[in-house]
Structure formats: C-alpha cells, structure tokens
Amino acid sequence: MSRSWHTITPLIAFNDPLEVWAAQPTFLLAEAVFLALTVWGIADAIRRPRGLLTFVACLVGGTCVELVTILHGEVGNFYHSQAVVMLFGKREPLYMLLGCYGWIAYATIALSQRLGGSALAQAGFAALLGSEAWALLDAVGAQFIWWHWHTSEPLYEDREGGVPVASSFWITASMGSMALVLMRSPSHAACGVLAGPLATLGLMNVPFTLIYHPLVTFAGYHASVALWVLRAACAAPLISRVSKTFRPDASLFGQMVALVALVVGVALFADPTAETRTSFGQACVASSATFWGGASRCGELETSFWGAFERTAHTCTASNRPARDLYRICDPACDASRTPLETFTSCGVPRADGWTALVLAHSVAVIALAAMPFTPVPHAAAKTA
C-alpha cells in the first residue's frame, strides 16, 4: 500500500445504479437520501442569515479531514463502498462530502445558532447533536458495510456498536469547535473556506489534548470514558436552559426527522447479511502468504500517523473478526493472493445483540435535541429564525 498520497484520478466516476442496487441496496438508498438532504439544506441555508457561511465552512472543514483520511497512506484507516457518484480515484462518494460533512454539520450548527446564548452553550449543543447524528449514521453505515474501518488501528481499538469511540469523540470535538469558530467569523460565505479547516484541523485538537490523550493514550482508560467526560462538559451549560415550551425549527427539525427515518428504516427492516461490498479496504492477502524469511504477510506491521502508532498493514481471513469488524472477507482472491489486494469483496454479518436498541437510543437522542427543548435567547432566536 502506498505510504504517500493515493492517486486522485479519475476525479469523478460513475457506477451503474442497478449494479449498486444489486450489491448494496441500502447504500443506494442512503446516497439518494443524503443528496436530497443536501439540496434541502442548501435551500435552507440560502434563506438564513449566515446560512451559506455555515454550509461552506462545514463542507470545506469536513472535506479537508476526510480527504487526508482516505487519500494519505499514513492515515488510510477508513474506506468507502462504491456509490453511484465517486470522486478522487473512486475512493470518495460525493454524497459523503455533501450530505454528511456538509448537510449534517450545517443542520447541527444552524440549530445551535438558533439556540443562541453563550458561546459555550451553543458549542455544547452543537457537539451533542452532531455527535448523536453521526453516531446514528456510523452505527448503521458500519453494520451495512457502507464503509470499513482499519481493523487494527490503535485509535480505533475501543468501539461501541462496531463504531470506533475515537471517531465519535472527534465529531463531538469538531462540531463544538465549528460552532465556536463561526461565532467569530465574518458573515461572507467565502470566509467559510478558512473557518471550516480552522475548526476541524485546528481547534478540535484542544479536547483531544486536554481530555482524550491524557485519559486514553497515557492513562489507559477506555475511550468511552473520555467521550462521556466531553459530553458532560458540553451538557453542563445547557442544563439550566431546559424548557418544555420552545417550538422546533420546522425546516431543520424536518431534515433531522428524514435522517432518522432513513437510518431507523434500514436498521429495522433491511438485512445486513444481504449486502455485498466490492471496493477499497485494508489490503487483504492470503493467510499463508509470507515474506522475509517466512514471516506472515497477514501480520506484517506498519506505522501510522507518521510514526505515532503501529498497526498491521494487511488483513486476511485468519485475522478477520466478523463480529467486531462488521464484515466477513468472502472473496476467494484474498485467500489465493500472495500480494496484498486493495480492492476485494466483503459480505455483511448479522446484527449483534443490543445493536438495534443502540440505534434506537441514538435516534431518540437526535429527535429530542433537534426539537430544541431549551429556552432560546430571544434576540438570537429572532436573528436566526
């Protein structure tokens, strides 16, 4: 696997929708819904003060992190399935940039702006809602193999419902950081090009430095401890503002309901074992493949994050843990290949006990937060309504 940048050509490519539907019907449905939510979100942003600034910042900030994650071999720990519209060497689905990093973050920040009040209250609300929306998406996306995560990345060792807790911590920190940065940003939409990366590449490192790494990297606590410490800090400035009378923002609430309807519908009524994915992943190799005097290629080590961590470079049927990895290697080429294959076929696995309850819990949290059960600051609500 390349330890530098992967090729980004073709810049855009198209897959046959019928082929996507045959292999991963839920993935095609998700792509269509998220592109529709993107259109709804942009239309919403146009009519709101600072709406376009917010959408641009969220889109650019999220894209910067996403492209480093999927395109540079030193990170390279997240791999998408093949949607209808793919970008950058067929490694990035268009819907992910527009609908997930763009729309989810936009709706989250717009709701926090409607809340008004102190910077900490708005940032705390954005962090909580954004993390719950992404937790909901991550749980279902991983279970239905819309993507893979690296199986031995140290940052991803601690998981909840198959989702790396570090990923949930990152989105919590990023959404709170985005709310803080946008509060100080000029209103012109073009300013989002700088504001977004400042939040997602810069300010979001503060919670990692103050909370995550001291507790997890150095003290050895489970990553969920750091996540709940951060969540508690985000919730603290909101407790005094809990209300029973605040009316939801009809447009933004409707958008969040659409997200929940998609994800819960897939979770309850679709079968993950019917999904078959052929795309990039952590390179697979035959379990018996060897190198350098008989050492196993499946256990070959490499560094990640420019030497900060160490992980296995490849996966194989012997090391594949379907219940944890949320996929099963079902490609005969992996068992036959003596050299690593970056593209291979994997199959979905059954839901674990408690997984559906976890998805429903995240769904309730998203709807409850999107309903805005807090007392708004009057002048802020008036400006952003």
Image (cartoon, rainbow, N blue to C red):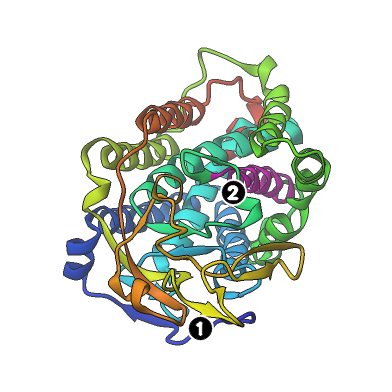
Residue 93 image position (x, y, % from top left): 41, 67
Spatial distance from mark 2 to mark 1, Cα to Cα?
24 Å
Residue 165 within the segment the image draws in magenta = yes
Residue type pointed to by label 1: Ile
Q: Is residue 109 above or below residue 94?
A: above
Q: Which residue is mark 2?
A: 167
| Residue 383 in the figure: left or right of residue 341 | right
| Residue 259 in the figure: left or right of residue 32 | right
* The image quarter in which residue 195 lies: bottom right
Q: Residue at x 37, y 65 (%)?
A: 81
Residue 336 image position (x, y, % from top left): 34, 77
Q: Residue at x 41, y 77 (%)?
A: 90
Tell me which segment is drawn in magenta. 164-182
Which type of secondary structure does the marked residue at label 2 adopt?
A: helix
Q: Is residue 385 in view? A: no
Q: Nearer the viewer, residue 218 or 94?
A: 218
Q: Is residue 214 above or below residue 249?
A: below
Which type of secondary structure does the marked residue at label 1 adopt?
A: loop
| Residue 47 in the figure: left or right of residue 77 | left
Residue type pointed to by label 2: Ser
In this rendering, the label closer to the viewer, 2 or 1:
2
